[in-house]
Image (cartoon, rainbow, N blue to C red):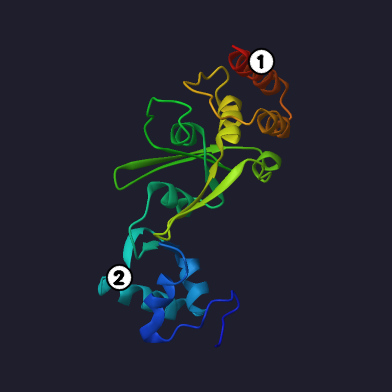
């Protein structure tokens, strides 16, 4: 079987959508489509995209982003701005660390950005590059519906959140890996954050001792 440079099977005209289905993704950027289909010519690429949108095999979600299946707001957040990962209020709520629901999908990225698509607001909070590229505590999520995204685990979400919002309160801290929380706090090189995490560790240990 012939493969393109990314390792995907070269798509014949009638097989392009099938190739997308078997790719393991539900959302695609224009560059994703070019790579998976093995099309380097821009005119040919856009002609194919327009055809599949017109015949309703592809759904245009936003400029340069297309879907073949249902998708989550977490998935879309990472296609709007790449690289990024879900964190802050969104990750805290997903892990049950806070009970209040905040508006929008919150992510960490290399730049600050805010965009509204299909009545959902996507907020990107800037991290310094040396912090952002450290993947400690970031988890990859994938389900049987080909929906995938990266999200801060509970310990990384706590550290990201206190880095952005000093003094933020948490509703639950059960199940937190204390050693991992302490380790992650050091990647920010921020004395104030490390002090807050140390205080949090003390509180958690005292609760466990009761």
CA distance for labels 2 and 1: 56 Å
Local crowd size for mark 1, using a 10 Å CA cut-off: few (<14), some (14–19), many (≥20): few
| Position in image of residue 101 (x %, y %) | 37, 29
**135 sits left or right of 105 in the view:** right
Q: Quadrant of the N terminus?
A: bottom right
SS class, disc 1 = helix
SS of the residue at dot 2?
A: helix
| 7 with respect to 107 (left or right) | right
Q: Nearer the viewer, residue 190 or 69?
A: 69
Q: Which residue is mark 2?
A: 53
Is 141 in front, or is 30?
Answer: 141
Q: Residue at x 61, y 29 (%)?
A: 159
Pinpoint residue 74: horizontal percent, then vertical percent.
Answer: 43, 47
Residue 153 lies left or right of residue 144; in this view the side is: right
Q: Which residue is mark 1?
A: 202
First in residue order: circle 2 vs circle 1: 2
Dividing the picture into quarters, in which one does residue 56 lie?
bottom left
Between 148 and 82, the one nearer to me in the picture: 148
Left or right, 158 with reference to 42: right
- Measured as percent of width and height from the top left, residue 96 is found at 45, 30
Residue that appears at 56% across and 17% down: 167
Q: Position of residue 63 (x, y in %)?
A: 38, 59
Q: Residue furthest front?
A: 210
Q: Residue at x 66, y 15 (%)?
A: 202
């Amino acid at each position: 079987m012939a493969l393109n440079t990314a390792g995907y099977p070269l798509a014949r005209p009638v097989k392009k959508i099938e190739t997308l289905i078997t790719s393991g993704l539900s959302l695609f950027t224009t560059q994703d489509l070019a790579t998976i289909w093995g099309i380097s010519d821009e005119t040919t690429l856009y002609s194919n995209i327009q055809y599949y949108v017109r015949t309703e095999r592809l759904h245009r979600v936003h400029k340069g982003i297309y879907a073949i299946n249902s998708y989550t707001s977490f998935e879309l957040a990472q296609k709007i701005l790449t690289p990024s990962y879900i964190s802050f209020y969104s990750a805290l709520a997903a892990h049950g660390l806070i009970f209040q629901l905040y508006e929008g999908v919150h992510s960490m990225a290399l730049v600050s950005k805010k965009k509204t698509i299909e009545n959902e607001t996507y907020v990107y909070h800037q991290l310094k590059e040396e912090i952002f590229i450290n993947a400690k505590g970031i988890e990859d999520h994938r389900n049987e519906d080909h929906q995938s995204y990266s999200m801060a685990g509970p310990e990384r979400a706590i550290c990201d959140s206190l880095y952005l919002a000093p003094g933020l309160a948490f509703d639950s801290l059960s199940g937190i890996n204390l050693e991992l929380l302490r380790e992650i706090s050091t990647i920010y090189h921020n004395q104030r954050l490390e002090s807050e995490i140390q205080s949090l560790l003390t509180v958690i240990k005292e609760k466990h001792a009761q």
